Amino acid sequence: MRERTREYLNSLLPHDSEYKRVEPLLEYKKDAREHLYPVIHDDVLQLIRVLIKSNGAKNMLEVGTAVGASAMLFASFMGEDSRVITIERDEDSHKKAVENITSYGYADRITPLLGEAEPIVADMVKEMQGQFDIVFLDGAKGHYIYLLDDCVKLLRPGGLLIADNVLFRGMVSGADKLIRRKITIVKRLRKFLIAINDREDIISSVLPIGDGVSVSVKVK
């Protein structure tokens, strides 16, 4: 997407009552960006907000907590009776997320887990299969393909699998030059995009917003 078009579309994003209720989180999100923590793009955040509302989501799994800003926003969008489980493998980021989630008053709705996503998600399948309305992948991009099967199992029928940064700076589509040290990530993301479109238990679409986001709905 051309930068001027992106800027125009982002200028249209609302700052209604729901966003005002989470203004402290949006300020923290701005602070996180200044401190070089990974932060979700505004247009992707708005898309997820729309999907949460249309899906009636109350239970969400996030892979890639960073410092907790997105998990708190998702919990706000889903309401007081929501639940977010979020996984982070970096110990320093996890510690900061726990502090933020507690200080902002979300400890009763958000469960932050520390560790590698693949074994944690595999263990969750044993106890929580079919219990999530949304699974959001925003962690290590090269691991999306290995998480796919278990993430689909965790979704209820009609649940959504959302994966962020799937076009990875234009390198996945070939729109931008491939950086040699990123070849493995790009190859795995291409496998992921092929897989979500080939599966019969989900229907998928890939949108060129943010750094590319895929949305898949689990069908019966």
Image (tube, rainbow, N blue to C red):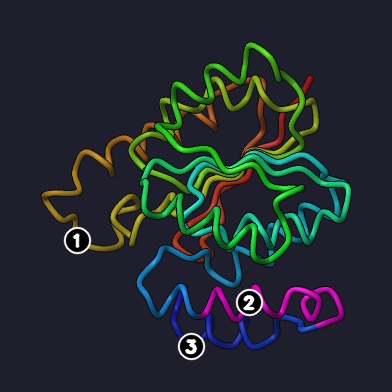
Determine if the magenta segment contains residue 23: yes
Q: What residue type is labelled 1?
A: Lys
Q: Which of label 3 and label 2 is nearer to you?
A: 2
Pinpoint residue 100: horizontal percent, then vertical percent: 58, 63
Q: Residues within 10 Å of mark 2 (few under 14, many from 20)?
A: some
Give me the C-alpha separation between circle 3 and circle 2.
23 Å
Q: Which amino acid type corresponds to the residue marked 2 in the rendered image?
A: Leu
Residue located beneath label 2 in the image: 26
- The residue shown at (55%, 59%) is 99
Q: How far apart are marks 1 and 2 (CA)?
A: 33 Å
Amino acid identity at mark 3: Arg
Residue 123: image quadrant is top right
Tags 3 and 1 touching, CB below 8 Å: no
Q: Is mark 1 on a helix, strand or loop?
A: loop
Residue toward you, 127 or 102: 102
- The residue beneath circle 1 is 177
**Which residue is depicted at the point 53% across and 31% down?**
196
Q: How far across and how far down the image is residue 157, in percent?
A: 79, 25
Quadrant occupied by the C terminus: top right
Q: Name the residue under label 3.
A: 4
Count residues near mark 3 (Cα–Cα under 10 Å), then give few for <14, some for 14-19, many for 20+: few
Asked if 210 appears above or below 86 in the picture, the reply is below
Q: Which mark sits nearer the N-terminus, 1 or 2?
A: 2
Q: Which of marks 3 and 2 is nearer the N terminus?
A: 3
